[in-house]
Image (cartoon, rainbow, N blue to C red):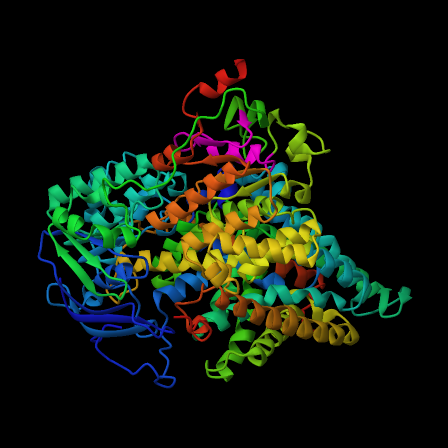
Amino acid sequence: MIMTMAKTPRLHLVDRVNPVSRLAAAMLLTTPLLLTVDWVSAAVALGIQLVLFAIAGVTPKVLVSRGWPILIAAPIAGLSMLLYGQPEGTEYWSFWLARITDGSIELAVAVTVRVLAIGLPAVLLFMNVDPTELADGLAQVAKLPSRFVLGALAGARLVGLFMEDWRAMALSRRARGIGDHGVIRRFATMAFALLVLAIRRGSKLATAMEARGFGSDHPRTWARESRVGWPDAALLCIAAGIAVLAIGCAVWAGTYHAVWA
Amino acid sequence: MEARGWGWRHAGRRRSALDGIDLVISPGERVLLLGPSGSGKSTLLHALAGVHGGAEEGEETGSLLIDGEWPGSVRGRASLVLQDPDSQVILARVGDDVAFGCENLGVPRDEIWRRVRRALDEVGLDLPLDHPTSMLSGGQKQRLALAGALAMGPGLLLLDEPTANLDPAGVDEVRQSVARTLDRTGATFVVVEHRVDVWIDLVTRVVVLGRDGRVIADGEPQHVISTQRDALLAAGVWVPGVRATVPTARPAPAASVVDLEGIDLAIGRRSDVVVRSGLSLALPRAASTVLTGPNGAGKSTLALTMGGLLPPLSGRVRASEGLADGLKADPIRWRSRELLTRIGTVFQEPEHQFVASTVQRELEVAPRALGLDAATTARRTHEVLERLGLDRLAEANPFTLSGGEQRRLTVGCALVAQPRVVVLDEPTFGQDRLTWIELVTLLRALVDDGTTLLSVSHDAAYLDALGDRHLDLGSDALRMEAAA
Amino acid sequence: MHTAASEISSPSAPRKPRDLRWRVVDIVVASVIGVATGLLFLFWNNVGYAWFSAADALTPGLGGIAVGIWLIGGVLGGLIIRKPGAALFVELLAAIVSALVGNQWGIETIYSGVMQGLGAELVFAIFAYRRFGLLTAMLAGAAAGAAAWTLELFTSGNLAKSAEFLGLYFTTVVISGAVLAGLLGWLIVRGLAATGALNRFAAGQDVAQRV
């Protein structure tokens, strides 16, 4: 995340929203969609999202470069549902446990669109979140315990060092004569060494933090104020609005299909 | 601060790290704390800062008080700067990092930013508050840590080997910042360090701890240093004015055979970022070449490129026919296994190189990759273990070794394959005097036996001992070498 | 933490009642492990997911075999930190890292992290944060798998799949959790303790009896 931050495109309007509100908005928007598997609610939500993200300045290029894992995952999830979805109506093809039926086709379409509608907002809303601002927000606005939030933030900062460690370790494997064979074994030795280094660094970092008075019961102050205002409220309203509209359309169209039904 | 019969035993250890310490330091005193590794110097410093851990990490005896109170309850009165620059940067931006301590002490917001600016000013870090901390050099990171400590307004400033991991320029930066601060604030000051010459002019008192964790000498700096000279040398301390007894470098003959040369190189760790270009250099056989230059000049990158680990971005690295031994001339095109007997590389950070669970198995990695039979493997690993004085540790886990032992092991891992060229990146970083002497002696012997050596170093004494040839990346000398 | 420091106990004292409050080093190291695990997930999100999706799309429920690695955070956290909430914290943090960097599951990853972490946490809690052996580790991994399976009934719409699929998937996920998260996690922690990296933790002090 640290490496990609520099070249992250800006999001108009959304940039002014506190990261915590963005997190809340993503939850508000996608959680209701998790409760139903139908193509109407997912398609409505996805459609509105795409329009709004376009307004916020997300170009197709950004969409693909940031959202590719989702774009790949969606059809795969659909295929699984196509073969193993609850059979219903006419059966077109079957093999062992796999059966393609009217019901499974409809579910497959729904799941494909649903993965997109649920996955994209999180990726796009978070693509330029600064970890420090998120931590400030979580501690000051969401009132999570500051020891844990700041501990996690400081730990997360070590990621940049881990990347350097990883590169150096890969070169050293070549120098030691084991660089060409046994990819899995090599990966295992590097992952393990990384954990050792990580824990060592973490222990020292903890000492450094304590040396600066961190972790006492003394109430702490905040050098940076994390604020919420009307842009936050607006984003939350929009998120809730999309969710209500999407579910509403599905109910109206008669396609609403609760996951437990 | 006042210690009365104070001691500390780490959980899981049978022996106490410190025992029966009686020590009183008055306000305004400046103390240099010396002693062999394992004498508990750091433990004492951590205890003074109140960060040695609670009952889960060890047991305390006697009493240790700051201004008559237990250190853990007056956190912030003493502040501590540690050895490793990377592990004490807490936040992503310079300003936030300095503010962190003040926030924890509950200082009001406006006051925090005033203190942050003043502290940055004091340590001479003239950077924007939102400057990313990941972009700082080692010396800058240590000064940042110092600023973070100063902003808390401590009465007692504690430094735990603050310059051990720095190049000479960084050492100087930190020393000057500390001197300025002490003169302004008059804070009490305790520093632990192997290199006496860095601090000797600044301190008013030297305390020496013995191997058993007790105070063995205490007094005025020059007096203690002269009376305790032998004990300090035996403890691995760099005593000013005493040179290490190692052979000095002898200039390589001008017309000697070249083992490895770089021709009009452009170097970089990533294919899209060129660190330096137009570099040409040659490594004469059976001689030691030392590469120096300021931070960021691309010394390590050049060494790794010469070592066949990084591809040159343009130009080429060419091995002599003798070295290539039937392969193409470009080391980067050799296979990992083929590299072993030709060029051995030792990285700056030993822990990046470990792949096995014991020292013995670590040494067997290269012979295995080469497909040597069991008898040869056993003979070679045994030789190396003995030569490096690691035989006692054959069954130890490499990660548990001391810094000096780890360094020797990584050198051993390269030697066991008997390469003709050895490349070393900062081999003497953070070494005390004893391990330094061992290492330099070993490397000199290698060169005498016909090995070609290329080292990257900041260390002036290392250059004196092993700089048969000296290449300075800070100058244009390397370009001129192409013409010669 | 702020009591007088002169409680002296004899070196051979049997297990003293453990302090279950989190120290700063617990928090920071748990965070570091969480972040490192999150990076491992990023790798596995590609490699493991390739297997998962190929198997999941073409076979009924066998995709579950790959799931275990995604559950290892809870086991590592519980075994190393040994404090209430450690399994949950580490697994959740790993999930957040995975989600923030960007993956195919978006916000859902965070719910998964919570559920999987709770699954493992439950087992450590049942053993009252006193037992950290292989059995505990494998049970924690298996429970994390069961929790993941339960959540996916809703989030992946798996309730709409056939009972045979769900049965097979449950079996593979639980076994994968026990082995790839439980057994592997236990082995990793044992290896870490041997390197001395865990000296500030009970998990490391049990092993390191050097000097």
Q: Nearer the viewer, residue A203 or B355?
A: B355
Instruction: Relative to B329, say whether C46 is above or below.
Output: below
User: In the displayed structure, does residue B50 sit left or right of residue C167?
Assistant: left
Residue C203 lies in the magenta stretch: no
Residue A88 in the figure: left or right of residue A249 = right
The segment highlighted magenta reads B282-310
Q: Residue furthest bottom?
A: C14
The reply to whether residue A251 is in sight is: yes
Q: Position of residue B196 (x, y in %)?
A: 23, 45
Considering the image in quadrants, where does the C terminus of chain A appear?
bottom right
Residue B70: image quadrant is bottom left
For residue B284: magenta? yes
User: How many callouts does the rendering have?
Assistant: 0
Residue A218 vertical position relative to residue C50 in the rendered view, above or below: below
Where does residue B320 sit, x and y in percent of width and height?
64, 28
Residue B128, given in percent of the width and then of the height, sits at 31, 35
- The residue sitting at 22% across, 66% down in the picture is B72
Residue C95 visible: no
In percent of width and height, residue B339 lies at 64, 40
For residue B123, what is the image quadrant? top left
